């Protein structure tokens, strides 16, 4: 069975500081991993994905994520947080044998403090 | 390109009533998904269509929920009769044909917020 854990419900960071939003996963085979962001009253927006290749993936709005197979983690990072980054972030996983179905974590609310 | 469209954006109904949601995916996207997102949780897949066929509906409560995708484009999700626990945001998403490398990204609509009283 596939699953995703986001251990932090809430992350607060000061504007200009680096941010990390944590995600760990469990799949039976090789994972496909995704990060989505959700702003209030809007649908989920795709940020980045890991399919294969380089463990450091770069995505939209300056975000990046590091795939770590030994720790089964896929943490989202940004070197310098902006107030406009404040939103709800979801990690998702599917396995290669799946029907492209995504399994989402419970989300982490990021608040960037001016 | 235009995104995934959904309507209505908000709906309030009483329990035991029926409700329907509509979704228009991105043009050319063969795969369409309906998700249920309960407050404080991540989205949960209800049903996946590829063209007008159902790929996965294992999480769809079939005694009250139904969905169709006639002609392989627009889709409708229906709940009849609604229960209090159906209060949630219903998200529609679409992607290119599942199975190819371009299909992995799902594009989401703004969702329909359903409140059952």
Image (spheres, rainbow, N blue to C red):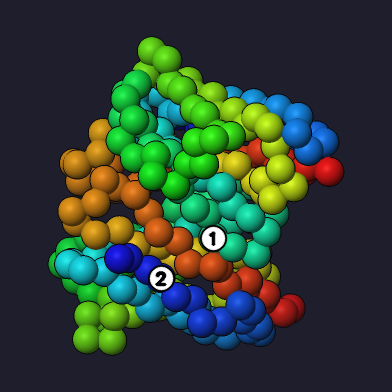
Q: Nearer the viewer, residue B30 or B43?
A: B43
Please state the horizontal and vertical placement of residue A50, each as a whole percent of the image. Answer: 27, 63
Position of the C terminus of chain A, as image quadrant, is: bottom right
**Secondary-structure class at tag 2:** strand
| A109 lies above or below B97 | below
Q: Are marks 2 and 1 in contact (CB under 8 Å)?
A: yes
Identify the residue at horizontal 56%, vertical 47% (top origin): B36
Q: Nearer the viewer, residue B2 or B11?
A: B11
Residue A60 appearing in the image: no
Where residue A4 is drawn, which disc sits there? 2
Identify the residue at horizontal 54%, vertical 35% (top origin): B63
Q: Relative to residue B62, is residue A52 drawn left or right?
A: left
Position of the N terminus of chain A, as image quadrant, is: bottom left
**Secondary-structure class at tag 1:** loop
- Image mark 2: chain: A
Please state the horizontal and vertical placement of residue A40, each as a whole percent of the image. Answer: 70, 54
Identify the residue at horizontal 44%, vertical 53% (top origin): A46
Q: Nearer the viewer, residue A24 or B29?
A: A24
To which residue does mark 1 refer?
B42
Label 2 Cα neighbours within 10 Å, binned few <14 / some 14-19 / many ≥20: many
Please state the horizontal and vertical placement of residue B106, each as a whole percent of the image. Answer: 39, 45
| B15 lies above or below B19 | below
Residue A51 appearing in the image: yes
Please state the horizontal and vertical placement of residue A4, each as a whole percent of the image. Answer: 40, 70
* Mark 2 vs mark 1, CA separation in Å: 10 Å
- Asked if labels 2 and 1 share a chain, the reply is no
Identify the residue at horizontal 52%, vertical 29% (top origin): B66
């Amino acid at each position: 069975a596939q699953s995703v854990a986001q251990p932090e419900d809430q992350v607060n960071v000061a504007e200009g500081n680096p941010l990390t939003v944590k995600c760990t996963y469990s799949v039976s085979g090789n994972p496909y991993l995704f990060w989505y962001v959700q702003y209030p009253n809007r649908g989920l927006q795709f940020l980045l994905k890991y399919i294969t290749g380089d463990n450091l993936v770069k995505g939209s709005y300056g975000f990046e994520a590091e795939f770590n197979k030994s720790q089964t983690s896929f943490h989202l990072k940004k070197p310098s947080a902006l107030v406009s980054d404040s939103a709800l972030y979801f990690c998702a996983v599917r396995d290669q044998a799946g029907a492209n179905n995504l399994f989402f974590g419970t989300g982490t609310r990021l608040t960037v403090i001016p | 390109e235009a995104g995934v469209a959904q309507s209505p954006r908000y709906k309030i109904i009483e329990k035991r009533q029926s409700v329907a949601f509509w979704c228009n995916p991105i043009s050319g996207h063969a795969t369409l998904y309906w998700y249920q997102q309960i407050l404080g949780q991540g989205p949960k897949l209800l049903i996946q269509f590829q063209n007008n066929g159902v790929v996965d509906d294992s999480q769809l409560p079939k005694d009250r929920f139904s969905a169709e995708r006639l002609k392989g484009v627009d889709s409708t999700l229906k709940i009849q009769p609604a229960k209090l626990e159906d209060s949630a945001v219903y998200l529609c998403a679409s992607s290119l044909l599942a199975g190819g490398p371009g299909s992995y990204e799902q594009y989401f609509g703004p969702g329909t917020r359903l409140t059952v009283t």
